[in-house]
Amino acid sequence: MTQPTDTILSRRAQDASTAGSKNLMWDVLNNLWCPLTNPDGYVNVGVAENVLMHDQFLSFINTKLDLPAKYLTYNDGGSGSLRLKRALSQFLNRYLHPAIPLNPRHLIVTNGVSSAIEHVSWAFTDPGEGILLGKPYYGTFIPDMSLRPGATVISVNFGDCDPFSIEAVDRYEEALLAFQQTTNRKVKALMLCHPHNPLGRCYPRDVIIKMMHLCQKYNLHLISDEIYALSVWKNTVDDQLHPPVEFESALSIDLNGIIDPRLVHVLWGMSKDFGANGLRLGVIISQSNSDLHQALKGISLYSYASGVSDHLTSLLLEDSDFTDEYIRRNRDKLSESYTCAVQYIRGHNIEYAQGCNAAFFLWVNLGKKYCQLHPGGNIEDVSDKVMQVLLRKKVFLASGDLFGSEHPGWFRIVFSQPREYLNEALRRITDALALKD
């Protein structure tokens, strides 16, 4: 039988296949370094995972988990059990300090925050309509918002302007107007990552308020992805070019006179603050938009969190003594790991972005260091060149190219690893930069 020459996949499936084939991360995760069992594997400091508290988390799970039979059923439906929503409301009320206390009616549970991002993109935009996203950005925001929902992500350039400043809000407006004038399509939302991935900083309260005013002016939804909200720690080593800003949730702002509350939405999940990417549990918080809740109820079957995840998260968040101690120790460990990574980077005279006090990231200019070590070379794409030498040394970082970096040569190091592992990664990075063609 002759084979058809045309693909049997839809165009959107072809696009997804092409995007997936370029993702090196899955190859890395299937060949991870272990000094005893796989010494030739990759040292991975490119994926946003926090493994510093896995022992404590597993100890809780293995002593507490006793699954009732109802979690083998559909339970309370696709948007999460009532018990879980109560536990989430009580927990997030304690830590996010919302101006209006959360209750279960405000929450839609999903199987991870990626699903939550896709859902709000689908709900707020028709195909081709825009969502504003400042550079640099978490790279997977792009497919989350565009691959299946069909939204157009409008990346916002800041140039020499600090992206966390009041002045930066004007750049969002400029990008909005340019998009609408050139495409004749609407912009429907502004996406924040707060605390920020990859820069590890928090947006000041007055900046968030100005963004809310901008959203009110153009009737945009403000989506604040606060997945790193509790991973905020003390920075003891930087020179404070940008003094760290304490985290304040968008929920903590009294919206009266600022923005229609139907336009404000917050996302959170278990992946980062509790080091549980594999648990697949996220939540959309929308306190005043009943239409959104009704729309997402209809598609919640496609982002159904498992009964095991639902039950385990309920158990965890109901135990305030455990969660308080867990968060405190996690913050201390993140601060220590950041200090370790910065001291090493400084010791090798590598430029990095200062002012971090949140999340797991060190934003470093490896391209500049590579050029200093290899003067006179004709390097057309320094980011690509650095990635090549990193992979030769079997160390995986995320390139700034994937984050829409406005400047070449920047990379993201994930420092939330045990000390031995982090030291091995840092050593391989500097060894890679010294490699010659």
Image: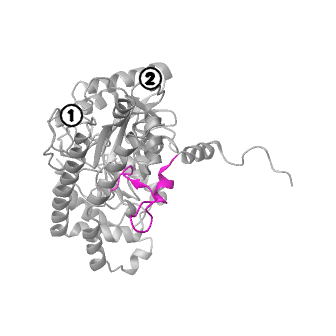
Q: Is residue 253 magenta?
A: no
Q: Which residues are magenta?
A: 23-49
Check disc 2 and report the residue beneath it.
180
Judging from the image, the colouring scheme is: one colour
Measured along the vertical axis of the image, is residue 153 above or below residue 273? above
Amino acid type at image mark 2: Gln
Where is residue 29 shown, x and y percent of the image? Answer: 46, 58
Mark 2 and mark 1: span between their CA atoms? 23 Å
SS of the residue under disc 2: helix
Dominant SS of magenta comes to loop
First of labels 2, 1 by sequence position: 2
Q: Quadrant of residue 383?
A: top left
Measured along the vertical axis of the image, is residue 179 above or below residue 111? above
Left or right: 394 as drawn, with respect to 264: right
Q: Is residue 183 among what the camera can see?
A: yes
* Residue appearing at x 39%, y 77% in the figure: 70
Q: Is residue 36 magenta?
A: yes
Q: Nearer the viewer, residue 392 or 223?
A: 392
Q: Is residue 269 among what the camera can see?
A: no
* Residue appearing at x 40%, y 74% in the figure: 71
